Image: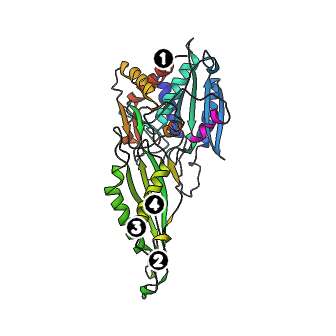
Amino acid sequence: MSEGLFGLLEDLVRIPSVNPMGRDVSGDIYYEDKMTSYLENWFTNLGVEFRRNTLEPGRDNIAAVLPGSRSVEDGGRLIMLEAHQDTVPIDGMTVEPFDPVIQDGKMYGRGSCDIKGGMACMLTAFKRFVETPPPDRPTVVMACTVNEEFGMSGAAKLCDLWLEEQWIPQPDAIIVAEPTLLDVVVAHKGVTRFELEVPGVACHSSQPELGQNAIYRMARIIQVLEQYAAEVVGQLNEHPLVTNPTLNVGMIEGGISVNTVPDRCSIEVGRRTSPTEVPDDAYQHIIDYVRGQLADEAWADEIIFHPPTISCGGLSDEFNGELASYVQQVVQQAGHAGQRIGVPYGTDAQAFSLHQIPTVVFGPGSIDQAHTKDEWIELEQLEAAADLYYELLVNFGA
């Protein structure tokens, strides 16, 4: 199995599927269309029914299904394996991003860890299940989504397969591939990101009293946000498994030249929410706080809070306790720690948790190697994960 698994991952790494992350870029390394075509061919050769699920032109989710020994209508169960097709950009990488190399028990290349390694393991387990199906088995869906790295909108669209298209029933359980070192993630943060803009009045810098400096105004706003980050946000919606909510001002833009008083300044703000927070509520809380702290400023009403560009909830552990216990049992019986943990980053799992579908995040590799300049994954983790995904399917029950 190992040779086929490693060869499959090498194939996946060789196929560029870079998410442009909102940047205006061009080139054949961007977007997931080549990866989706590869997966379509792979499912065709396997002889299973599949469906593309279009997010936008050139960006398709793809999912394949093996019917269970009993239909869901007759009381059968459905379990889904899910992994995303896209990777982060390759800027600054010190290894060849699309020419995978195996060395010292590791495979190097963009996506090897996040999350083509996990996808290869899931595909391997799915293939094994299809080729030797147990007589008493659940319906199994293997789903590969787009645009996880910049908004997770592909996972939200995937839900149309049962909510709108009714191609499959709603899953009873979903396992999302991300690098967790084979621990079981039951909770994680969400996120809301938005642009904040403040106007000024332009004039020549030799007579600044004739204008209003937008950057100075923004400096005052940033002071308020720094205070919010230090004293307020960490006290909101604490969760025992996940670090406290956070806020970060990550980008700033303003001015056209040093001899012109700037008439505009903008910043981009990121707010990480707790697993149970509603991102839109978190966004509104920031607006109310900033306006309240600056109420005495004559220009406070001119501040523009643009709608969030990304707004994703977290993974709540309110609905996945039974599934988490099952995954833990299978993982621990195989000799792994299989701890039940929470993490600070976000995943596609949030889209399914929103519909109260029992969902956990579980996969090979460490998040510490994701998005890095020399991204890699241990081969031993891959072998273990492929076996564990298969056991999770076999033992799930019809």
Q: Is residue 159 magenta?
A: yes
- Label 1 environment density (alpha carbons within 10 Å; few <14, some 14–19, many ≥20): some
Residue bearing the label numbered 4: 287
Q: Upstream in the sequence, badge 1 or badge 3?
A: 3
User: Measured from the top left, where is residue 101 in percent x and y?
Assistant: 43, 37
Which residue corresponds to mark 3? 221
Residue type of the residue flagged with mark 1: Asn
N-terminal of the pair, mark 4 or mark 2, is 2
Residue labelled with disc 2: 262
Given contact means CB atoms under 8 Å apart, are the residues at marks 4 and 2 in contact? no
- Position of residue 360 relative to residue 374, above or below, is above
Q: Quadrant of residue 162?
A: top right
Residue at 47 percent of width and 45 percent of height: 97
Q: Which residues are magenta?
A: 156-171
Q: Amino acid at mark 2?
A: Pro
Disc 2 packing (10 Å; few <14; some 14–19; many ≥20): many
